[in-house]
Image (cartoon, helix red, strand yellow):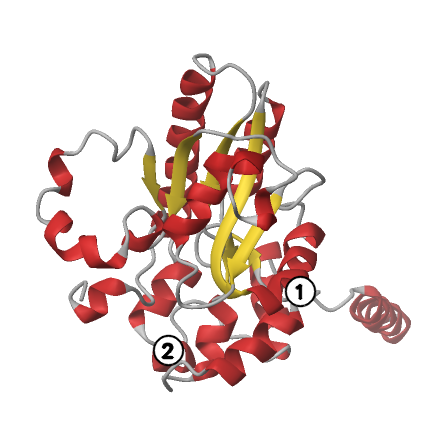
Amino acid sequence: MKAAILAVILSCSAHSRAATPAPAKESPAPHELEAVQKQAAGKLELGAAKKESLPREILWVRDSVEYAKACVQAFRWGGQAVEKASRRQKGDWAVVLDVDETVLSNLQYQIELGGKPYDPQSWDAWVRRKEGVPIPGAREFLDRVRSLEGGHVVFITDRRSSQEEATIENLGALGLFKDGDLLLGKIDKADTKEARRRCVEQGKRGQNPRCQARSPMPIIALFGDSFRDFEEKYEAQAYAARSDEDARWGGRFFVIPNPLYGQWERGYK
């Protein structure tokens, strides 16, 4: 009898052990899963050792919240100023913007340069790849300008005039360039940004054929990442010392931060 009872107990114990599933491995949290996926793709998370091989200015533009918010802030303040100034305009008017590092980020090009100096051949190849991405806040600002009565968007860039088509296609694919906008690349050394701003202001009344189809338009705001987007090169060094007293900064002139390159590297010479 005792032997039979013992056999039953052992049988139940064995069945209990077999029926109890092994503890399941805990599923990773969504952010952990994302990190695993990025590592599997060869993209390291913030703080990984490989990332530190990039210059700090590239890391700041690529990774910092502060950079993105500084750009958004400039465009929002600029939007408020443009909206206010537009109420005083009769007829057409324009906002003029630089392209590179103002509305279009070329950070990937800087990364691919790997610390080597800029050269026209690699830059031209990059432009024709049409892989620039929007600067934070730019698209919303441009749409705001276009929504205002009489408002026109004009891009004045140091990209060569031969690169205009690729540039417009890159901007257009991102919703940054739309019908009615104007883009003026650089034809030659004499074709300064100041000369092209005059072209916009004079329109069909001027001598520049590139603006002959346009009505004259006052420029009520300028956006750029370089001093030359606001003042010509020969004026920059003398003007820089007193620019903090000029009410146009933050009123008509709006700067997008660019720690990657600029006139500051050459002392504004």
Location of residue 189 (image quadrant):
bottom left
Looking at the rendered structure, the secondary structure element under dot 1 is helix
Left or right, 85 with reference to 217: left
Is residue 137 something one can see in this rendering? Answer: no
Q: Is residue 192 above or below residue 79?
A: below
- Please identify the quadrant where the C terminus is shown: bottom left
Query: 115 or 13, which lies in front?
Result: 115
* x and y, in percent, of residue 260 in the image: 34, 67
Residue at 67 percent across and 45 percent down: it is 175
Q: Nearer the viewer, mark 1 or mark 2?
A: 1
How many neighbours does mark 1 have within 10 angstroms: few (below 14), some (14-19), or many (20 or more)?
Answer: some
- Please identify the quadrant where the N terminus is shown: bottom right
* x and y, in percent, of residue 158 in the image: 45, 62
Looking at the rendered structure, the secondary structure element under dot 2 is loop
Left or right, 109 with reference to 3: left
How many neighbours does mark 2 have within 10 angstroms: few (below 14), some (14-19), or many (20 or more)?
Answer: few
Left or right, 176 with reference to 46: right
Q: Is residue 2 above or below residue 181?
A: below
Residue at 48 percent across and 51 percent down: it is 156
Q: Amino acid at mark 2?
A: Leu
* x and y, in percent, of residue 163 in the image: 60, 67
The disc label shown at residue 166, or none: 1
Is residue 138 something one can see in this rendering? Answer: yes
Residue at 59 percent across and 18 percent down: it is 149
Residue at 57 percent across and 41 percent down: it is 139
The disc label shown at residue 54, or none: 2
